[in-house]
Image (cartoon, rainbow, N blue to C red):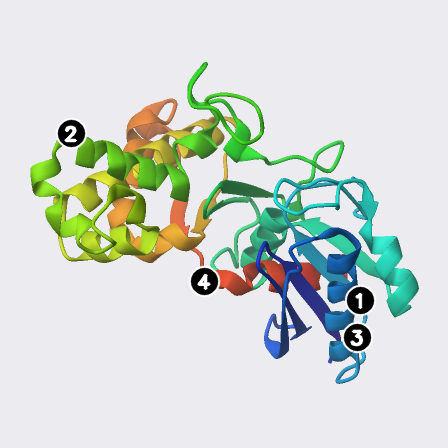
Amino acid sequence: MPFSIGIDVGGTKVLGGIVDENGVIVTRKLKETPREGGAALTKVIGDVALELLEEQEVEGIGISAAGFISADRKTIVATPNIAGWNGVNLADQLSDRLQRRVVLENDANAAAWGEFRHGAGLGYTNLVMLTIGTGLGGGLIADGVLYRGGNGMGAEFGHMRAVPEGHLCGCGARGCYEQYASGNALLRHAREAISAAPDIARNLLSRGNGTVEGLTGRHLTEAAREGDPVAISAFASTGQWIGALIATLIAGLDPQAVVIGGGVIDADEILLKPTRETMHRLVPFGEKHPMPIILPAKLGNDAGLVGAADLAHH
């Protein structure tokens, strides 16, 4: 049975695993992401891979990382959250050290591929994945192929314009969907609701440290499950923006399915119901247009690792 290594590089941890041809992670290794990034982080990734190679020979190594990745899947062109990595040819550096083929992939693309091959997207040939964590990542499978675009930087759905001259985004533009349909946006929607109706927000505020700033996405999810109206309102606002984005993507891409992953999916139907309702209301041609099925992701935090490992073969 062929095996490969997938390594998912995050802002706080580097998670590696040996993955079999069925997408099952048979061995895991975890190390902290060094705060200085750069060469120190590249070394940690290599260390994780070497530890895994001691346990199993593999056919290839795939690396999942946030940021813009070059079309040849070797170089990190730009990454927003890791210092000292812009312009680094990570694949060649690691290949030289590990003496194995190494490929690099954007984290949202890797997650989309993982769900397509071994998760919620199994059986579909055209699907969109939205990874909704702190930000909003996107991935696209078109006719069974991972779409990367002409320069390797396609499917950045979170940075499509939702509101002209809207909220400032970390990418430098204004009004990106990421500012309205992400984990950070969920918290902002909650704060706006609290400001509008502070008397009914006491229950929600009590879950943190008593302040608006102390609220987290986990607090909102727990409160919404228990029927808190402010938390439910925040999820409804976020879901409406996600639904609006999906309606736009339907017009341009016509996917069979939309897989939604990331931390906010823990709210399940509290988020997905307003998402579906808005999609149906805004999709071009209304009821005449076939609607994609909206599915929660199945692989959770392992999607990027599993997808990267599988892409090491492709």
Pointer 2 residue: 196
Given this view, does label 3 or label 2 mark the residue nearer the observer? 2
Quarter-of-image position of residue 195: top left
Question: Do tag 4 and tag 3 residues touch (Cβ < 8 Å)?
Answer: no
Name the side, left or right, on which 267 lies relative to 230. right
Per the model, the C-alpha gap separating discs 1 and 4 is 24 Å
In this view, the residue in front, 38 or 147, is 38
- In the rendered image, residue 46, in percent from the top left (x then y), is placed at 79, 67
Q: Secondary structure at mark 3?
A: helix
Q: What amino acid is found at the position of numbered circle 2 in the picture?
A: Ala
Name the side, left or right, on which 162 lies relative to 160. left
Given this view, does label 1 or label 2 mark the residue nearer the observer? 2
Pointer 3 residue: 50
Of the two numbered discs 4 and 3 on the same chain, state the one appearing first in sequence: 3
Given this view, does label 3 or label 1 mark the residue nearer the observer? 3
Of the two numbered discs 1 and 2 on the same chain, state the one appearing first in sequence: 1
Q: Which quadrant is home to the N terminus?
A: bottom right
Q: What amino acid is found at the position of numbered circle 1 in the picture?
A: Gly
Pointer 4 residue: 298
Count residues near mark 1 (Cα–Cα under 10 Å), then give few for <14, some for 14-19, many for 20+. many
Instruction: Point out which mark residue 60 bears.
Output: 1
Question: Compared with residue 26, is residue 201 higher up or lower down, i.e. above or below?
Answer: above
Q: Residue furthest left?
A: 199
Per the model, the C-alpha gap separating discs 2 and 4 is 36 Å
Point 57% across, 43% down: residue: 139
In this view, the residue in front, 140 or 236, is 236
Q: Which quadrant is home to the C terminus?
A: bottom right
